[in-house]
Image (tube, rainbow, N blue to C red):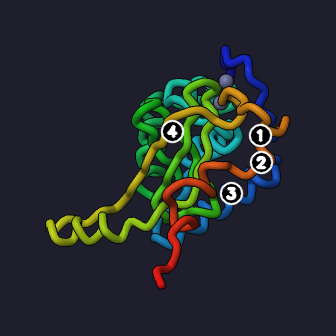
Amino acid sequence: MTSPCPHDRETAPPTAAQVERALDAAAASVAAAGDRLTRPRRRVLELLHVAGAPAKAYDLVATYHREARVATPATVYRALQFLETRGLVHRLSSLKAYVACDPKRLGSPAVFLLCDCCGFCREVPAPDLAALNAAATAAGYEIERITLEGQGLCSACRPPRPGAARDPVLQTEPEAAAGSGPASIEPRP
Ligand SMILES: [Zn+2]
Ligand SMILES: [Zn+2]
């Protein structure tokens, strides 16, 4: 992925073994649901895992073709649709792009932190969505998938704070300690 962002973010691409493990886990979860991770589905998922970042469907069509096999846009779109309904990929509406689900979070609601500057994308654990699920149940609705997107600036692209350590990635976020989160709630005597 090319980006005009001048900020330095070190991202290690996934190893071939990690991608292979993710694909095998995906195949197992699809098989458990009585379906198959066909070659196009597996290939599209592989491309997304290798990219390690959100990718647009037409980029996937282009990359798919570079290999020995060819795919029509329809094949790629159908594969994406299947993978999305199985929770193996997530569609990020704000970017009109797809990203592979973190294998550790398969089946969980997805929350993504997106950087407006460098395009960095990280999947993080979802907050407690019990209230949302209760509201859905009360409305007679069954939620099948949830994808939340938080947009802002990543630690590499944020302007440095005065007196902050050089490597913001390794720093504890000051907001987490000082904010109105559960950490600051004191038990009342
Ligand atoms: Zn960034
Ligand atoms: Zn940046």
Indicate which disc residue 98 carries: 4
Mark pair 3, 1: CA separation: 29 Å
Mark 3 element type? helix
Q: Give the quarter the ligand 2 occupies.
A: top right
Mark pair 4, 3: CA separation: 16 Å
- Mark 4 lies within 8 Å of ligand 1 (Cβ measured): no
On the image, which quarter does residue 116 sit in? top right
Q: Tell me residue 107's x, y (percent).
A: 49, 65
Q: Residue furthest right?
A: 166
Asked if the residue under mark 2 is in contact with the one under mark 1, i.e. CB atoms within 8 Å, the reply is yes
Point out the tag, 2 or 3, that comes first from the N-terminus. Answer: 3
Mark pair 2, 4: CA separation: 30 Å
Q: Which residue sits at x=68%, y=40%?
A: 52
Amino acid marked by disc 4: Tyr
Point out the tag, 1 or 4, that comes first from the N-terminus. Answer: 4
Q: Which residue sits at x=78%, y=26%?
A: 8
In the rendered image of this protein, does residue 118 appear above or below residue 98? above
Indicate which disc residue 10 carries: none
